[in-house]
Image (cartoon, coloured by chain):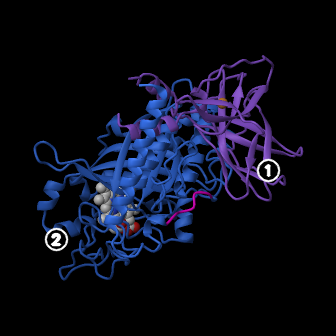
Chain colours: A purple, B blue
Amino acid sequence: MSSILRRGLLVAATAAALVLSACGSPAAPAAPATSTAPAPTSTSTSGLTVTDAWVKPADAGMTAVFGTLTATGGPVTVVSAATSASPRTELHEVVMNGGAMTMRPKEGGFVVDPAAAHELKPGGDHVMVMDLASPIRPGDQVRVTFTLAGGGTVEFTALAKETTGGEETYADHAGMNG
Amino acid sequence: MTAVARRAVLLGGAAVAAGGVVAGAVALTPGPPPVAVPVPGAETVAFHGAHQAGITTPAQAHAVFTALDLRRGSGPDDVARLLRMLTDDAARLTSGRPPLEASDPELPALPSRLTVTFGFGPGLFDAVGRGGECPAVLRELPAFATDRLDPRWSGGDLLVQVCSDDPMPLSYALRRLVRSARSVATVRWTQRGFGPARGSEPAGTTPRNLMGQRDGTANPAPGAELDDAVWVREGPDWLRGGSMLVLRRIRMELDTWDDFGREGKHMAVARRLDTGAPVTGGGEFDEVDPRMVDGRGIPIAIGGAHVLRATARDPAERMLRRGYSFDDGPTADGLPDAGLLFAAYQADAARAFVPVQQRLAESDVMNQWITHVGSATFVIPPGCAPGGMIGEALLG
Ligand code: HEM
Ligand SMILES: [Cu+2]
């Protein structure tokens, strides 16, 4: 495999496939939302708009929510998130650590600058959904609530869409030594 | 190789690639940088609205019809998940954007009037527990004497119809839509069709089919006439604003047709090949006059001519024919394997396609060269608003 292609695969790594142990506290969270409408754009007076929100399907354990965050006024900081899919959610970033991409909680949350949309995507910042209560299947919807610095909230719906980005990459990467 | 060393190699590789792109761009563009001009590829057709697009939309040059079958045991929840994903994908793709989870914006960026249209077969009604409400005519069309139907091209629970003036965005759209669908459904058949290239004749010119005829001349005129023929005005909410599609795969015997005399070809349809005008005179958009006789009192248009047999004998028989040619040939023996994906949209197939096809099966000079080899019928549900879902009224 060419190094260019290999690098592309690494960058495409999906958060859920990266190194992190799920150390969850069991609770009884709500099941994924079941209304029939597809994921709409959030509309809020909080100064933050979330568009193109989606979530990677998963049978159990953890998964991640992605989307595009746009600050409509001044800078906005997302300090935490909650979802209808699980009792435990973290804001994550992905960093290069000794040559491997690793995810970890993002210090200070997601800071969204009005000058540029802040993208949550596989291989980058994401909302980590942990201790899934029930499977998220393709086409399911997950309600997400962001809490902003200052206490405001933004609600939106993420549509579950399948991707293999990351999974095969991680295996590929591991098998490529030498 | 250590992880750190590998990373250095990877970054080096990327730098080389970037340099190559820049050098290439310089070599290929000696003049001033190109100015952004509107291109036909950027043209879009709105996905949302009271009706689904891709029906009264002026026909694009390319089409693909794919029938999906719901996986065994699928219920209303699975159908809702499927339609939620497909609706979201379709809204994005038709506006030139990639599906939510896709990362290649270039592929759908020039949709060239891409439309995505969904149809519900009887199996979908069964899966959502409303089998009894599927219009009887769509559950099973009557058998026609001339039918030679192959299950390979027939039936289906969910139709995905994708049209575009450009086969590139069409191919991408189909692959992404099917990818979204495949956890819930399997692919039953795919039929690809084409018409004349966009711009080969002035917009609005009636396209020709593979027999060389102008095909679509007598279609209902855009506006009230077309709307009355195509859209369901009353009935259940999941059907109102929708339509019914009868899709027939019709093989043409093009070898014998090509050798048939031109006068005979005109007589078979009662319209001329060159202009599409009636053999009884006038221009393309005039009607064939069945009473006109020649000097010896013999009717000029023969009674079995396709147009005379097919023409609506009551307003309810009107339909929009929006077909596409297909060509899967030549065969190993050098024979054509081609025909027409005949797609008729109407408010009620029981009162339009069925009586018309009954007359054609009974007698139509064209039957010497055309054979129906596939058949599929679908409810075309109404359109949806942004944030809505195709089929929401059926699943609600
Ligand atoms: C390969 C098969 C077929 C071919 C090549 C064909 C070709 C044509 C042509 C050349 C015309 C005259 C121009 C026009 O008005 O479009 C025509 C008219 C028409 N055809 Fe067909 N046709 C086929 C099958 C069918 C079928 C299956 C139906 C319906 C069951 C049908 C219904 C009609 C109708 C309603 C008209 C208009 C008649 C009028 O003048 O009012 N055709 N067709
Ligand atoms: Cu994570």
Q: Residue B357 location, x and y as percent?
A: 38, 53
How much space separates mark 1 and mark 2, taking CA atoms?
A: 76 Å
Magenta stretch: helix, strand or loop mostly: loop
**Extent of the magenta region:** B43-48
Of residue A24 and residue B76, the one placed in the foreground of this image is: A24
Q: Is residue B376 visible?
A: no
Whether the magenta-drawn stretch holds residue B44 is answered as: yes
Q: Which residue is mark 2?
A: B263
Badge 1 marks a residue whose secondary structure is: strand
- B13 or B366, which lies in front? B13
Establish whether labels 1 and 2 are both on one chain. Answer: no
- Asked if the stretch drawn in magenta spans residue A126, the answer is no
Q: Which mark is residue B161?
A: none
Q: Which residue is mark 1?
A: A76
Find out if the beta carbon at label 1 lies less than 8 Å from the nearest ligand 2 atom: no
- Residue drawn at x 43%, y 54% is B169
Q: Residues within 10 Å of mark 1 (few under 14, many from 20)?
A: many
Q: Residues within 10 Å of mark 2 (few under 14, many from 20)?
A: few
Give the letter of the chain under mark 2. Answer: B
Q: Secondary structure at mark 2?
A: helix
- Of the 4 image quadrants, the one containing the N terminus of chain B is top left
**Does A161 appear above or below B200?**
above
Q: Is residue B213 visible?
A: yes
Task: Name the residue: 32% across, 51% down.
Answer: B361
Determine whether, in the image, residue B168 is placed left or right of residue B373.
right
| Residue at left offset 52%, top offset 63% | B44
Residue B350, compared with residue A62, is above or below; it is below
Ligand 2: give its quadrant. top right
Residue at the spot 59% in from the left edge and 41% down from the top edge: B85
